[in-house]
Image (cartoon, grey):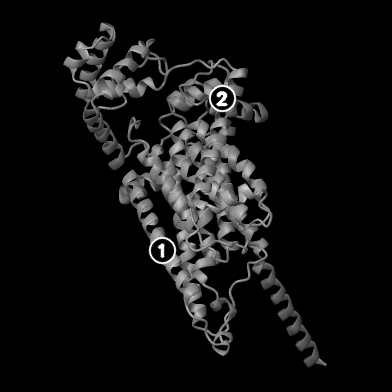
Amino acid sequence: MTEPRTTNRAAEKSTNGSRLREFFASPVVWDWILALLTLLPALVFTALFFPGRANVDIANQYAQATGDIPFSDWHPPIMSAVWRVLIGLTGESGSLFVLQVAILALACWLLGVLVHRWGEHRWVSLVGPAIMATPWVVSQMTTMWKDTQMAVAMLLAVVLLIITRFVPKTWVLWIPAVVLLVYAFGLRKNAIFAIIPIAVYVAWLLVKRLRSSPQRGSRLLSRFVAKRGLATAVASLLVLMVLGAGVKATDLAIASQEDVAATGQISQIFLDDVMFSVPDDELQASDAPAELKDKISTARDKCLEKGEIWDAYWNCYDMGATEEPFSPIAHQDELRDLWLSEVITHPLRYVEYRAAVFSFYFFSSALEYWPADWHYDAAKVGLEQGNDKADYIVKPYVEDFALDTFPMLFKPWFWTLLAGLLLAFGYRARRRSSTFATAAVSSPAKSTAETTSKPVQKMVSRPADARTFWPEITMLATSALFYVVGYFPIVPSNHFRYTFWPALAVTTALLFVLAMWRSKRTEAASDGSEGSKPADTSDIVDNSDTREPGDTP
């Protein structure tokens, strides 16, 4: 009697253990585990730094959001408008900070899920949530920079767009993606440099979808879509027009509710160019008002004594006409005329000056971390200070470990170099893929016996129609490069926040590179064992990719 009972118990334990393994092997369960691993650090981070840290720029935008001062266009009104809505809904000044963290957390979780459902090992998918913990991300997420808001919005938009490529019937995600891109564009107008490659990627997705559609519509549309390069270029322009129209519509909507004062903030760039590229004798010989010329000359001497040839508005010009922060510069029209007559008419010295400022930005960095002690501007407008233990926990990690040990992590040149390498590797991989696909198509057919002796997946030209992240890597790396280079004519300083999007974009691209590298190693190991089966992800990932060789953006 004992032996059957023992056998039954062993069988029952084996069955329970099998069910438990099946439960944890479920992709859905792993999605929830990734969600938990993303949510817990996000909550801890939010608790430490709530309601978010602020410098004078952010404090000014908060005062607009609360109605303490009128709206102005020195900073993007869209951020103050969103902040006002959030405060109205929640009653919390830190609601914008929570939104900022939530957007990044959602993007990182979706990245982990995407990589896992793509068929990659689970440990690789953990890199998605781990992006939040990298020091260059932590350093900027503590503060509600418009640059940080822009970067996380673009990241989530990109992730949503990538999902529409791999997962069937998810084109509705284009709506929130476009909204996020409009928000990012509205936050920083120079985001256009980063958005151009994203627009090309969107256009490529659209053209690819139309080409693979069994019903393409009219004959004219079919012929147009058949010309992939032209169709993608035209579609890219249309996407940029939609985003530009969205920004314009948003600005008009805000202006209909608020009296947004025009400040001519671009005059700050004109001021730097005139002050530091036009010789004083030519400046004094110009037709500009004597008051403007004398003030520029005096301010230039102050800046040169400080050893700073940038950001004159803040460093030596005593700000605007009222000598208050964000007040408009006096004689803006005359300053613009000076720029047109004395700066762009001498392109060599203009480029020389801009190269000097860009070199300062490109090879150095500042404001990698905003400490709690710098709370004075936030305190003036009523923003509360966060947990006083936050700096003791996070600052050593960002500054003492990462910044002191690996300073390149906070330098634009480093992320530009990585982006360039990714593009080079991507180009090489696509060339090899196209060559292999062409050779596979043109090679003579093998005998039936030889062909059927191998697994089915080996009969297909794998590089030509395999799932790949190279389009996404190319888009992210190009976006990072364009954004850095786009700062050449406008960069005012060397704050790391100007490099946050390139760092975030390249980090995401590196995750995709890691996933593809692991996938290749797995395939190589599978090729060594006859009859091995590839991971079954057909129920999750769209494998109906009908790309032709080299059909990538």
Q: Residue furthest left?
A: 281
Q: CA distance from mark 1 to mark 2?
A: 44 Å
Q: Residue furthest top?
A: 290
Sequence order check: which comes first, mark 1 or mark 2?
2
Residue on which the image places disc 1: 431
Contact, mark 1 vs mark 2 (Cβ under 8 Å):
no
The one nearer the camera, 369 or 539, is: 539
Q: Is residue 303 left or right of residue 527?
A: left
Q: Amino acid at mark 1?
A: Arg
> Looking at the picture, how far across and down is residue 460, in whole percent?
55, 74
- Name the residue located 67 percent from the left edge and 66 percent from the top edge: 26
Q: Is residue 302 left or right of residue 445?
A: left
Q: Is residue 300 left or right of residue 330?
A: left
Does residue 408 lie above or below 364 as drawn? Answer: below
Does residue 140 lie above or below 435 as drawn? Answer: above
> Looking at the picture, how far across and down is residue 160, in whole percent?
59, 48
> Looking at the picture, how far across and down is residue 197, in whole percent?
47, 45
Q: Residue furthest right?
A: 1
- Name the residue located 45 percent from the left edge and 73 percent from the top edge: 439
Asked whether the viewer can see residue 394, the reply is no
Q: Secondary structure at mark 2?
A: helix
Q: Amino acid at mark 2?
A: Asp
Residue on which the image places disc 2: 251
The one nearer the camera, 127 or 438, is: 438
The one nearer the camera, 507 or 459, is: 459
The nearer-to-camera label among 1 and 2 is 1
